[in-house]
Amino acid sequence: MYSVECGGRGYRWRSHFAIVIRVMKQTTTLSCQLFLLLHDPFTGKGEVSQELLECGVSAAELADLVIGRRLGIVDDHVVMAGLDRAGPGDRVGEYVLGCLADQSKSYSVRTWVGSLGEAVTDLVVRELVDDGVVRHERGSLGLRGRKPDRFPAVDLLRASSSRNRLRRMLAHPAEFDLAGATVASMVGALGAERVLEVHDARNVIKELSTYLPSPVHAVVDGLAAAVASASVALGGR
């Protein structure tokens, strides 16, 4: 088993998958990465339901802030940790930190995943559109109501980068870093491994997730709980 400092973010990433694990500085937030991964870059069609998309995107943002030491996890509850501000220009992170700072008590990961989903996803969409990565096509009205919005690529290379990077890591586990392992684990929690089009992705992701730092793993578990709750609610309709 080997370990390296991952991206200067403060957690040691340990894995039995690799002799050498690349240390890569993260330049795109995990919430943006996951959003792009869960949309077909050509058609812009979502790969999961809107409810699951929002759960995944909000969980990814929480994980990003945990990795960055802005948030902590104590007894499955999200707490403020260290600086109460996100990085420069991080509108999504600032919003999430502001929401937590406004509360007089702490809440579970699952609660925050559900509560933040819609607003965080809207902010991520705005960021990706403003940055010229995707465009926002509003769903048209049909006989069964409004069709889902689509987000086809404006910049295909950037819109596809998250998907291509994760596929490469799954095919060559020596290239996994903490950000990639976290996003992959969230794809697994959402049950969306099919988007990766990699043989045995589910088993690789399942094993990979066991090596996440415990606070990050807690966020993934909170996402899995939110997904299970959403599935039960859907089944009861």
Image (cartoon, helix red, strand yellow):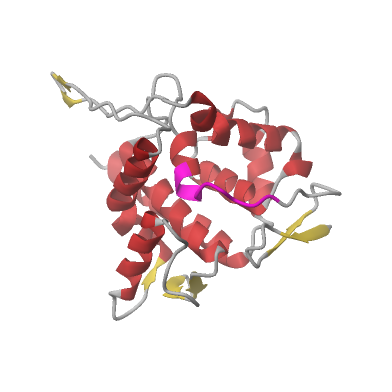
User: What residue is drawn where x is 50% and y is 49%?
Assistant: 30
Determine if the magenta segment contains residue 21: no
Which is more toward the observer, 59 or 20? 20
Could you tell me residue 147's position as x and y percent? 23, 25
Could you say which quadrant of the image residue 59 lies in?
Answer: bottom left
Helix, strand or loop for the magenta stretch, by majority? loop
Height in image: 104 above or below 197? below
Percent from the top left, x then y, of residue 151? Answer: 36, 28
Is the N terminus in the top left, top right, bottom left or bottom right quadrant? bottom right
Q: Residue 35: x and y, percent?
A: 43, 39
Residue shown at the point (52%, 65%) measured from the top left? 66
Location of residue 164 by image quarter: top right
In the image as oriented, which residue stretches furthest toward the bottom? 104
User: Which quadrant of the figure contains the C terminus?
Assistant: top left
Which residues, given as a range, are shown in magenta? 24-32
Residue plotted at (54% across, 69% down): 69
Q: Residue furthest right?
A: 19
